[in-house]
Amino acid sequence: MVYLNSNFLYGDDFEPKKGTLVIEDGIIKGFTSEHHSNVLNYKGLVIPPLINSHTHIGDNSIKDIGIGKSLDELVKPPNGLKHKFLNTCSEKELVQGMSEGLYDLENNGIKAFCDFRENGLNGINSLKSAFEDSNVSIKPIILGRPTQREENLLKDEISIILDNCDGLGLSGSNEYSDQELKFICKLVNKKILSIHANEHKGSVQYSKEKYGISEIERLINLNIKPDFLIHATHSSSDDLSLLNENKIPVVVCPRANASFNVGLPDIPKMLEYNLKLGIGTDNFMANSPSIFKEMDFIYKIYHVDPKKILKMATVNGAEILGLQNTGVIKEGYIPTFTFIKNGNILKTSKNIAASVVTRLENGDVDSKFLVC
């Protein structure tokens, strides 16, 4: 039994609550008013775990390459500037970069993240090696990406990838024929399938010129329903309606979109269509993995209710990634928390959730305080 006395953002509505939380057998049981001698006292603020729902940690070794280049010039496989630079890095450099990226995630209060791992099994194993070299308390969701195109080789490679990670994270539907997409998706079985879609105007235009429809419309027409999409930056009302009808969540990465100068997702409109939204920070080479910066950016650009933004960064991300009973501090949930050592925020803030969303930075995170 663990008793944690602190200030919490409690429940689905992130209400400030001070008290002693009871944790038993790895589950939150609620608050107690009884006196206990073995209480852990934490003077800061305990918030739900921050979830970074989309990263590319592999390019942490090549920060800020290609400033001023277009998105396709930078990251379009296989000849993007990113891929050319990564091909010049040794395995040791790549693993070291990922290891540093893991510490960066932890220091930003991230408790789980979803990484799109390029380079097939080798890319997956590189990230696993980085975890072995690091001492971080983070839950990784690893989505591999196949390198083969010939059908038999592709089938064998996907089988190996799925045996070694949580699913597939594809670059974009434009890079595959209808037959290839359907073939790949049949192999995923019960694991996660995610894909970039409608990231920039050029990708939407290419899809419309070649197939007569957007990337999202094409996926639905092919009866391919990913567990979640990345970006959906340039999505029409028809696209959003299809996502709503098919209950497909979206992970938005607005700072990365701004960094790559491809426009910004219409988050308020996505919310109008009742889409479940998560938040990611995308490429390490262009962005820090700070969900605090992402939340602050979203509020200042869109003026969405801070509690809705915090929900995107916590419980929505957990649900999108299939993390059960995670992302909220309440009865029945797993006691995974992000600890904020900045107690001053409690003294003067009149809206704690808003202050968390717009004012916190990685220096406010107590990444070493653990309760279970």
Image (cartoon, rainbow, N blue to C red):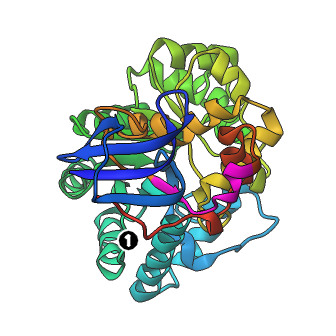
Q: Residue at x 39, y 45 (%)?
A: 20
Q: Residue at x 70, y 30 (%)?
A: 267
Q: Quadrant of the C terminus?
A: bottom left
- Please state which amino acid type lies under the numbered disc 1: Val
Residue 228 vertical placement versus 254 (above, below): above
Mark 1: give few (<14), some (14-19) or many (20+) Cα within 10 Å: some
- Which is nearer the eye, 307 or 78? 307
- Which is nearer the eye, 238 or 363? 363
Q: Residue at x 74, y 47 (%)?
A: 358
| Horizontal arrangement in the rendering, residue 345 relative to residue 335 (left or right) | right
Tally of numbered discs: 1
- What span is colored magenta in the figure? 338-347
Q: Residue at x 68, y 45 (%)?
A: 357
Q: Secondary structure at mark 1?
A: loop
| Horizontal arrangement in the rendering, residue 25 relative to residue 232 (left or right) | left
Residue 125 vertical placement versus 339 (above, below): below
The location of residue 337, given as percent across then percent down, is 43, 51
Classify residue 250 by image quadrant.
Answer: top right
The stretch drawn in magenta includes residue 333: no
The location of residue 200, given as percent across then percent down, is 70, 41
The location of residue 130, given as percent across then percent down, is 36, 76
Classify residue 134 by image quadrant.
Answer: bottom left
Q: From the image, tell me which residue sits under label 1.
A: 136
Residue 148 vertical placement versus 218 (above, below): below
Residue 366 visible, this angle:
yes
The location of residue 89, given as percent across then percent down, is 50, 85
Residue 146 visible, this angle:
no
